[in-house]
Image: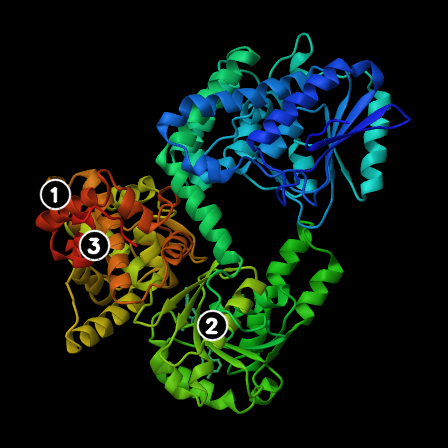
Amino acid sequence: MTDNMIAWDLGADRVLVLTIDDPSQSTNTMTEAFARDLTATVDRLEAEKDTFDGVILTSGKDTFFAGGDLNLLMDATPEDAPAIARGLDTYKAAFRRLERLGKPVVAAINGTALGGGFELALATHHRIALDAKGSLLGLPEVTFGLLPGAGGVTRTVRLLGITNAVLNVVGQGQRMKPAKALQVGIIHEVAATREEMFDKARAWIAANPEPAQPWDVKGYKIPGGTPSSPPLAANLPAFPSNVRKQLKGAPMPAPIAVLATAVEGAQVDLDTAFAVETRYCTNLICGQVSANMIKALFFDLGMINKGGSRPEGFPVRTPEKVLVLGAGMMGAGIAYVQARAGMQVVLKDVTIEAAERGKDYSRKLLDKALRKGAITQDKRDEVLGRIHPTADPADAAGCDFVVEAVFEDPGLKKKVFGEIEGLVNPDALLGSNTSTLPVTDLATGVQRQEDFIGLHFFSPVDKMPLVEIVVGEKTSDEAIARAIDYTLAIKKTPIVVNDSRGFFTSRVIGQFMDEAIALVAEGVHPTTVEQAATQAGYPVGALALVDEINMKLSQKIRRSLRENTIAEGGRWVDSNAYPLVDAMVDEYDRPGRLEGRGFYEYDADGKKLGLWQGLVEKYTREDHGIPFIDMQERMLFAESLDTARCFDEGVLRTVADANIGSIFGIGFPAWTGGVIQYINQYAGGLAGFVARADELRAAYGDRFEVPESLRAKAAAGETFG
Ligand code: NAD
């Protein structure tokens, strides 16, 4: 027996089972201690290889192995580069010795294996994954601004070829269920039970006494060819843009480094390829982008998804039967996610036909999932059976939770709540999916204002991961806790903000869109405006988004916002966007996609065809003189400065909510790790951000005025938030 965290268990059948179980943590990760123990185990395997016929590598935890130690990776700075590179090389050396042991080594992947854990599995000869609930496999490093640097890129390229490896595994960082991983080709077998997994492993060992990795077999060639082989050479130039498109706003440095590692590594021998991988990976680890992304997308997101903002002292309470008022676009989507989460849904609209149409939306999504094999017929029927469409208010009886999604009209919203408040359970939570209306005012339509809360979903509901929970003046802590429990139960991420017009997300995303429209009004070609946004890392062009949201709606919201803000003596700065929006609605009759006419043209099915040329003819000027970087930073800064004001006004409550809400709610570029990290990490830090905002203000107007709170922190050498 070794006394390390890899237990050594040699059976009478001469099969050695190695079980990884780090006693200091709930999951196995790549700690320094693990690296030492792994090397010691490999030493012993080599020394004692005459005593066994094969090795099964598995884990003593529910999961197989998580990846690198993200705390360590997040804190790395350029000075740590030599140590980081040495660490990666230690793993590479141990993995390489394992795959050249001369005895069959099988990974019995008993649960989730991601990142470094999956790289370990890739260094075995045969990978069998247990189809355990929630088990995920893959190399997600790129989603944290990193790349798999313990042989992951090099081995997947040699296993699958450059195209498959980059597009299906390392370029996007997909986390795959075992069946998908099998289909993609990164594992060899799936087992339904633990026993079956071990039986399969033993059978494979018996049948393959002297296995070698494909790349160690004489005459081996990379599947699909090397970068200089003609078909690949013809496709490679399109890779960077394809990867960026698929990643929708994810950071550029990591996918590009993945691509470089794959392409450079495929042209050299294995050892040199490993060295190339170490170099690119070390650079990413020591850079700021990965630090920001790990902080936001692993730690902050993890904290929020564990209910980190939930007020304490209330038992967890998830709804059993939810009344959804309004079966339109949002109500239908909300009904679907609730039914999928096991809740009974009463879906009410003014007519039974409208309610049935809302239910049809779920039917469509479920049938699609059934066709793709993602659910069974029974599951489909069960989920659909939970949605009860109705036009009868009496069906509200017995509901313990309400989500209202009727038209954005305060009078109507108050009226529908008034109708059902006495019919639902006496302590039912009363939630409104308003996107802009102050919740405190809507709450005056009900008796129990303490149970009234905003539940702001995003469209399309089944895809968008965020719910912005809006706390009105009278909303109780218990209502916040229940809203968080509900949001987590439907597998979405809750951020909690205080009430105001537009809350955080709707208000700040307006800045992004206004800036884009203003640029068009100032003479910039609309295509350039869209590129400014997407090349900055926004998932979609701003003008396409404006069309999606519809300018009639934004015009209405802006007019009432302007009027109210000015009446209340608040800060209001007009934008060059407004006259153009007004012209689009009132003069050109091009409000957006719904009408088939906006900044873009659409076909009858709402498919985007191309830019409306009239826009270019009327507005585009060659001599606008606005640098491309200014276009991008006008969008990024307008959103950042308004976020800072949201803090000052008490709308935002935590930095984590701001960062996560900005990425998942409004598409703020993910590579920044969220809007607050963007502000603090701008070149020159917060002081650099303030200086640049002052420049933008001088050039483009008072929208870029720096809030005093931010300027004071910059002057004191502090960070914001
Ligand atoms: P929609 O027009 O698609 O649907 C509204 C539905 O409410 C219609 O089916 C209508 O028949 C129904 N309705 C009207 N009066 C009713 C009544 N008295 N009782 C029951 N049902 C009634 O609108 P939508 O896009 O689903 O928006 C609904 C709400 O969600 C609005 O408050 C909107 O601001 C908000 N919201 C919309 C989005 C979005 O992207 N569309 C995003 C977040 C929030």
Report the amino acid beneath label 2. Ile
Q: Which residue is mark 1?
A: 624
Q: Are the residues flagged by discs 3 and 2 in contact, CB closer than 8 Å?
A: no
Q: Nearer the viewer, residue 531 or 565?
A: 565
Q: Residues within 10 Å of mark 2 (few under 14, many from 20)?
A: many
> What x and y, as percent, mark residue 141?
51, 36
Farthest residue toward the front?
3
Task: Name which quarter of the figure residue 161 lies in.
Answer: top right
Q: Quadrant of the C terminus?
A: bottom left
Q: Which residue is mark 3?
A: 710
Look at discs 3 and 1 and give the one toward the viewer. Answer: 3
Farthest residue toward the top?
218
Report the amino acid beneath label 3. Leu
Q: Quadrant of ligand 1?
A: bottom left
Q: Nearer the viewer, residue 547 or 203?
A: 203
Farthest residue toward the right?
12
Q: Would residue 332 be visible to someone looking at this image? A: yes
Q: Which residue is mark 2?
A: 480
Farthest residue toward the left?
698
